[in-house]
Amino acid sequence: MGKHNSENIIKHKSFEFAVRIVNFYKSLIERKEYVMSKQILRSGTSIGANIREAQNA
């Protein structure tokens, strides 16, 4: 497997994780867990941005 394929796998998995985090965030909001939900959303969705930044460096 080449570098390009592994980058696609990492991008795909980080995107799937971000989608799961957003859904978890929504369920926390429904339970009125506002502070924790905002932090989880920020940290969980920043992973994809960090991966892309590292790959482009």
Image: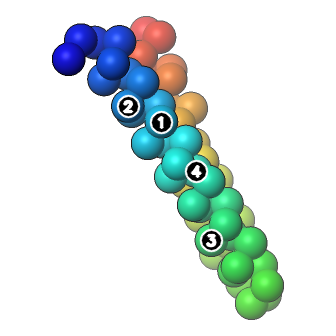
Work out whether mark 2 precedes mark 4 in sequence or the reverse, and give the earlier one.
2
Which residue corresponds to mark 3? 24
Which residue corresponds to mark 1? 12
Q: Residues within 10 Å of mark 4 (few under 14, many from 20)?
A: many
Q: Residues within 10 Å of mark 1 (few under 14, many from 20)?
A: few
Q: Tags 3 and 1 in contact by the CB under 8 Å rule?
A: no
Using the image, determine if residue 22 lies above or below residue 34: above
- The tag on residue 52 is none
In the rendered structure, which amino acid carries the disc numbered 4?
Ala
Residue displayed at 67% across by 60% down: 22
In space, the residues marked 1 and 2 are separated at their CA atoms by 5 Å
Residue 46 visible in the current orientation: yes
Residue 5: image location, x then y, percent: 33, 18
In space, the residues marked 3 and 1 are separated at their CA atoms by 19 Å
Front of the two marks 3 and 2: 2
Q: Is 45 or 23 nearer to us in this picture?
A: 23
Which residue corresponds to mark 2? 9
Q: Tags 1 and 2 in contact by the CB under 8 Å rule?
A: yes
In the rendered structure, which amino acid carries the disc numbered 3?
Phe
Which residue corresponds to mark 4? 18
In space, the residues marked 4 and 1 are separated at their CA atoms by 10 Å
Residue 51 visible in the current orientation: no
Q: Quadrant of residue 57?
A: top left
In the rendered structure, which amino acid carries the disc numbered 1?
His
Element type at marker 3? helix
